[in-house]
């Protein structure tokens, strides 16, 4: 009789104990899950604004890099082919120079130096637009809506500047690319964070 009671008591103790594996596989209660979800939402809401700023800054850098690369390529092509090379906006690929600068770019050898794709002119490259929002404007001496480089690597009396204005955050992420008479590009900016930046602007750009 006593042995039976002892066996029953040991059985109850064994049922009350859980193995380490069973403890690990217990899972979470509903309250624990709701608490974890609430904390995750709080941290996510705090991280979204900085993440958006990083994305917008990256888009601005990509757009400026795209444009500076086109300018440098045009200058290099003019020196290499010993002829005037023209860079202009080209929204529609087979229509020559047209549209806005942020719609796409066209680089060609401009034999008659008229800034138009005609006659014996030779297309060197077409650059499609990037998947970023924003606008690019060009202001220069002689007020031409194209940029020409001579065989010496200089502009065709067209020193001026490009201004990139993002659709979001305006002047905070705006960039100014100055092209001097020697055909060299120099980037000006308001904030730090661009790999191409060389000099900061004293005041914000107008967009």
Image (tube, rainbow, N blue to C red):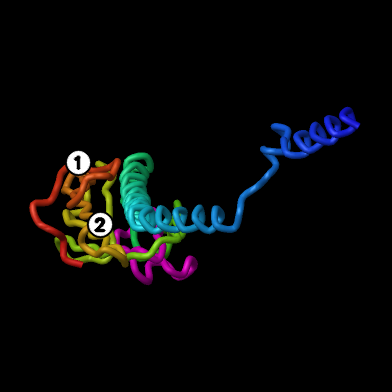
In this rendering, position of residue 125 left or right of residue 21: left
Q: Position of residue 149 (x, y in %)?
A: 27, 50
The residue that disc 2 covers is 173
Residue 40 location, x and y as percent? 47, 54
The image's mark for residue 198 is 1
- Residue 34 in percent (x, y) is at 53, 58
From this view, report whether residue 65 is shown above or below residue 205: above
The residue closer to the viewer here, 51 or 97, is 51
Left or right, 142 with reference to 9? left
Query: Residue extending furthest top?
Result: 3
Going from the N terminus, do you reach mark 2 or mark 1 first?
A: 2
Q: Is residue 75 visible?
A: yes
Residues under numbered marks 2 and 1 in contact, where contact means CB atoms less than 8 Å apart = no
Give the residues drawn in magenta, as a range.
89-115
Neighbor class of circle 2 (other Cα within 10 Å; few <14, some 14-19, many 20+) is: many
- Given residues 140 and 86, the one toward you in this image is 140
For the C terminus, the image quarter is: bottom left
């Amino acid at each position: 009789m006593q042995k039976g009671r002892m066996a029953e008591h040991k059985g109850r103790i064994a049922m009350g104990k859980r193995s380490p594996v069973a403890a690990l596989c217990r899972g979470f209660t509903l309250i624990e899950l709701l608490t974890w979800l609430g904390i995750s939402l709080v941290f996510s809401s705090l991280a979204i604004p900085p993440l958006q700023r990083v994305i917008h800054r990256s888009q601005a850098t990509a757009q400026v890099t795209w444009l500076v690369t086109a300018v440098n390529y045009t200058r290099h092509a003019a020196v290499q082919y010993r002829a005037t090379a023209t860079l202009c906006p080209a929204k529609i690929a087979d229509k020559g120079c047209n549209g806005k600068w942020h719609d796409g770019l066209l680089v060609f050898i401009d034999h008659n130096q008229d800034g138009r794709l005609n006659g014996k002119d030779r297309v060197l490259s077409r650059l499609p637009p990037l998947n970023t929002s924003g606008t690019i404007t060009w202001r220069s001496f002689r007020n031409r809506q194209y940029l020409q480089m001579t065989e010496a690597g200089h502009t065709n009396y067209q020193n001026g500047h490009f201004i990139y204005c993002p659709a979001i955050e305006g002047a905070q992420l705006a960039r100014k690319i100055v092209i001097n008479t020697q055909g060299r590009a120099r980037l000006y900016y308001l904030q730090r964070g661009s790999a191409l930046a060389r000099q900061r602007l004293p005041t914000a750009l107008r967009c």
